[in-house]
Image: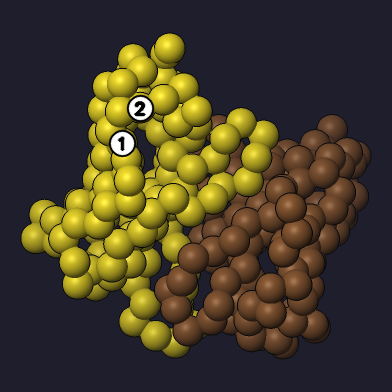
Amino acid sequence: DGGITQSPKYLFRKEGQNVTLSCEQNLNHDAMYWYRQDPGQGLRLIYYSQIVNDFQKGDIAEGYSVSREKKESFPLTVTSAQKNPTAFYLCASSVAGGPYEQYFGPGTRLTVT
Amino acid sequence: GENVEQHPSTLSVQEGDSAVIKCTYSDSASNYFPWYKQELGKRPQLIIDIRSNVGEKKDQRIAVTLNKTAKHFSLHITETQPEDSAVYFCAGTNSAGGTSYGKLTFGQGTILTVHP
């Protein structure tokens, strides 16, 4: 699959460490999103960005930070302030000005012990 | 903000039967309702979507219906096949403009199992 990629697929960290998850897209999409997926809770929005150098908090932004310096890239940092960081993280992108279909990356499974 | 409730959480059917998953939403201004399918270990993918100016949309064995008055929408899968087994998510969004454009609120997901 091309289009939108996330790395790494699996990530292990010790409690108290910050960790950055990568998300890159070559779809020329202006909008990008970060979701957290936990069993039985669907996809919950962490942060989203409609344009370079601008982003907004989603529903569960506490303990996370993002940057949007390039159109193609939207990295997510899980900080030590996030109380329950172990989860599956999905990045998505779409054409801006929508709503339009969101295209998802393959996800990163983060385990913090 | 928008709240989307999805039922049932699990659904088990025999191959060839129909499956129906229902979602309700809270924001009467919501106007876009996509359905995503996520197979085990894979990324969610859009299977069908509907906008608030239509009441029904079909794509082969899949259909979505929207009742704006009751604020609910449903996914209908006919002639189910084992490869339809997956987690299905509904979502809603209010594209009122500004920074909320395109922001989706997802339901909790339905695990569909189709038995051969």
Residue visible at 63% across and 81% down? A30
Residue B5, by quadrant, is: top left
Mark identifier at residue B80: 2
**Looking at the picture, how far across and down is residue A32, in whole percent?**
63, 71
Residue sitting at the far left: B69
Viewer-proximal residue, A88 or A19?
A88
Residue visible at 74% across and 82% down? A71
Q: How many marks can you see?
A: 2
Viewer-proximal residue, B10 or A39?
B10
In the figure, the shade used to draw chain A is: brown
Q: What element carries label 2?
A: loop
Query: Which chain is painted in yellow?
Result: B
Mark identifier at residue A88: none
Q: Is mark 1 on a helix, strand or loop?
A: strand
**Looking at the picture, how far across and down is residue A67, in whole percent?**
77, 76
> Do marks 1 and 2 both belong to one polypeptide chain?
yes
Taking the image as drawn, is residue A57 in sight? Answer: no
- Say whether marks 1 and 2 touch (CB < 8 Å): yes
Mark 2 chain: B
Taking the image as drawn, is residue B109 in sight? Answer: yes
In the rendered structure, which amino acid carries the disc numbered 1? Ile
Image quarter where the C terminus of chain A lies is top right
In the rendered structure, which amino acid carries the disc numbered 2? Thr
Taking A86 as reference, is B22 left or right?
left
Mark identifier at residue B77: 1
**Looking at the picture, how far across and down is residue A70, in whole percent?**
79, 82
Residue visible at 55% across and 59% down? A45
